[in-house]
Amino acid sequence: MLYHILYEFLYPLNRFWEPLKVLNVFTYITFRTAYASLTALLISLFLGPWLITRLREFQIGQQIREEGPKSHQSKAGTPTMGGILIVVSIIVPTLLWTNLRNRLMWVLIISTLAYAVIGFADDYLKIVHKRSLGLTAREKIGLQALVAVTIGVSLLYLMNRGIYSTKLTVPFFKFFTPDLLIDRLFATQFWFLGYLPFLIFVAIVIVGASNAVNLTDGLDGLAIGCTVIASAALTALTYITGHATLSDYLDIQYLPQVGELTIFSGAMVGASLGFLWYNAHPAEVFMGDVGSLALGGAIGTLSVIIKQELLLIFIGGVFVIEGLSVMIQVVSFKTRGKRIFLMAPLHHHFELKGWKESKIIIRFWIASLIFALFSLSTLKLR
């Protein structure tokens, strides 16, 4: 929006007034990413107190599970649904600083909003109907999968127009880029079967990322701190993927229109930092599912678009471990009748082991930073 006003409408007037040539700076993705991040940070910081006050007035407080750590009972009533602040702080700067003609950007924006709506519905049920678990697992996964498949279909549409690629980038392997689109292997009447591997893969990545962030959101500042680190790594990867010279030098897929998405990921860094200001221990507000599902959906969708789906395992290493801890716990209990961890997700296990909440949070942040740095190093370890 701001990009179009300042550059596309005002810049052509430089023929009449020389100083307007300075608006050429708006063509640089790095410039707009920096200001989108700063704008997101400022929106989050200045809008935060107002939103927290409104949430308190509407008595939108967190419901605490009775079977959880006893130390969490003191957090009951803390305003939740603060994820609204995160989503607004991401979307508004993105609309201001990006080129709105970019179709991939709209896929990413719509995906983020769709997962935010699912999270909002989940939070609404928890608060209004006093259902501590909100939507049922089947309802939540079903809605998430529906959105993910819709995203996959949209990307296939853009692939047919040369904007997107269905080839995978495999970490550590420079020349191994398998294509998930296998429609040519089927007879004409079964052409749709060739799209299934891609659509299933996209659904697993996005739904998995969304739920992994959701499961990590159990301690003050834990999920949002890890999101800051993961989104910063994704910002670098997105810029490289959309940069002809850098992508060629690092031998990764070059997708010209992907570069514009750097503005979105930069805004996600700024919005997350701003929210962390209020979510740091002891938290003044929780993000709720409206925030965690939206952030996870955005991270998953962005990784699919920039072709770093497999590298996301390392970028979001803490999220993956938290999600796996729940899966391992459930499988072990159902098959063996025994628990592997004192409680899942993993951060609760360490709480019951006697670790202080602040120590768990900071150590998980450190682990997230190590994972992110390792993920970036794999660009040369190929």
Image: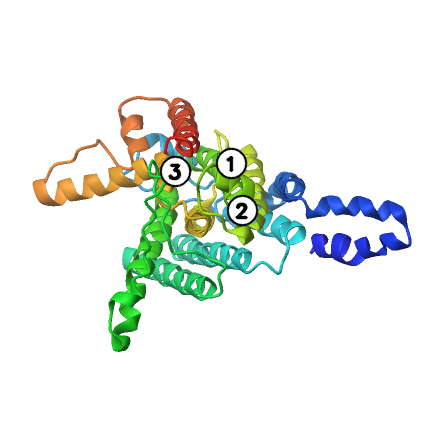
Q: CA distance from mark 2 to mark 3?
A: 21 Å
Nearer-N-terminus badge (2/3) = 2
Which amino acid does the dot numbered 3 rest on? Gly
Q: Nearer the viewer, residue 85 or 207?
A: 207
Residue neighbourhood size for the residue with mark 1, other residues' Cα within 10 Å, grouped as few (<14), some (14–19), many (≥20): many
The residue beneath circle 2 is 242
Residue neighbourhood size for the residue with mark 2, other residues' Cα within 10 Å, grouped as few (<14), some (14–19), many (≥20): many
Q: Is residue 9 above or below residue 177?
A: below
Residue neighbourhood size for the residue with mark 3, other residues' Cα within 10 Å, grouped as few (<14), some (14–19), many (≥20): many
Q: Quadrant of the C terminus?
A: top left
Which amino acid does the dot numbered 1 rest on? Ala
Question: Are the two marked residues, 2 and 3, in contact with CB atoms closer than 8 angstroms?
Answer: no
Q: Quadrant of the N terminus?
A: bottom right
The residue beneath circle 1 is 232
Q: CA distance from mark 2 to mark 1?
A: 16 Å
Q: Is residue 370 above or below residue 57?
A: above
Q: Residue 254's spot in the image, x, y percent?
A: 49, 48
Mark 2 or 3: in front is 2
Nearer-N-terminus badge (3/1) = 1
Q: Is residue 150 above or below residue 28?
A: below
The residue beneath circle 3 is 316
Q: Residue 33's spot in the image, x, y percent?
A: 62, 42
What secondary structure is found at the residue carrying circle 3?
loop
